[in-house]
Image: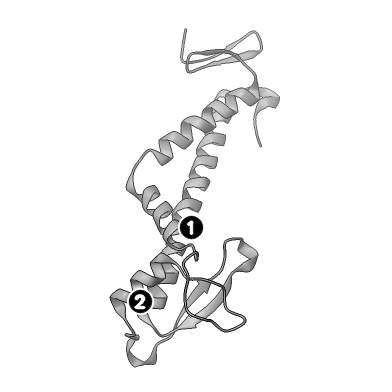
Amino acid sequence: MDTIEELNGTYFYAGRRNLKASELFFMIFCEKTVEQLGLGMADFGAVVALYAARNDQPTRAKPRDAIEGTSRLSKASRKFFGQKKFPYGIRLPTFIGGYTPWTIKPRMTAKISAFVGRTIPVVGWAILASDVSLISYKTVRDYNEIARGNDKLW
């Protein structure tokens, strides 16, 4: 029996028999997720960046409209860079908040430490968003190659 076949209106895939279309899609989704996330350090780095950026550390008193707490990443970058600023008075955009997309607030900063502490999590989110996009695309692509007729997506 081949790796991919159709048997009596159901599918055979990766050693599993009598799969419905939804079960086939789920099997391919799981396979593509393991393929994508099993590649290595980028995904691990993204998770570390997001975890280190959680603002769950106690900090000094802040203004009323500031977000409570600070992150491990922010503490480390401030310790490493201190009060150093970008040359020529350059101010770069950063984002604070954002554990849900509608709470993101843009802020301009001249401090290198604040820029680094706030930008690393954005890189983590970008890596994970890329992973989700690739997993989704490859799953639908491979599913549509196997599925027949009305079982196909799009």
Along the line of sight, which residue is nearer the eye, 90 or 100? Answer: 100
> Residue at horizontal 63%, vertical 68%?
103
| 1 or 2: mark nearer the eye | 2
Find residue 125 and name its label: 1
| Figure check: 149 above or below 140 | above
The reply to whether dot 1 and dot 2 touch (C-beta < 8 Å) is no
Q: What amino acid is labelled 1 in the image? A: Trp
Along the line of sight, which residue is nearer the eye, 41 or 17? Answer: 41
Along the line of sight, which residue is nearer the eye, 71 or 153? Answer: 71
> Residue at horizontal 59%, vertical 28%?
25
Q: Quadrant of residue 22?
A: top right
Find residue 78 and name its label: 2
Residue 102 in the image, given as x and y percentages of width and height: 65, 65
- Is 87 on the left-hand or right-hand side of 56? left
Along the line of sight, which residue is nearer the eye, 29 or 8? Answer: 29
Label 2 neighbourhood size at 10 Å, few (<14), some (14-19), many (20+)? some
Q: What amino acid is labelled 2 in the image? A: Arg
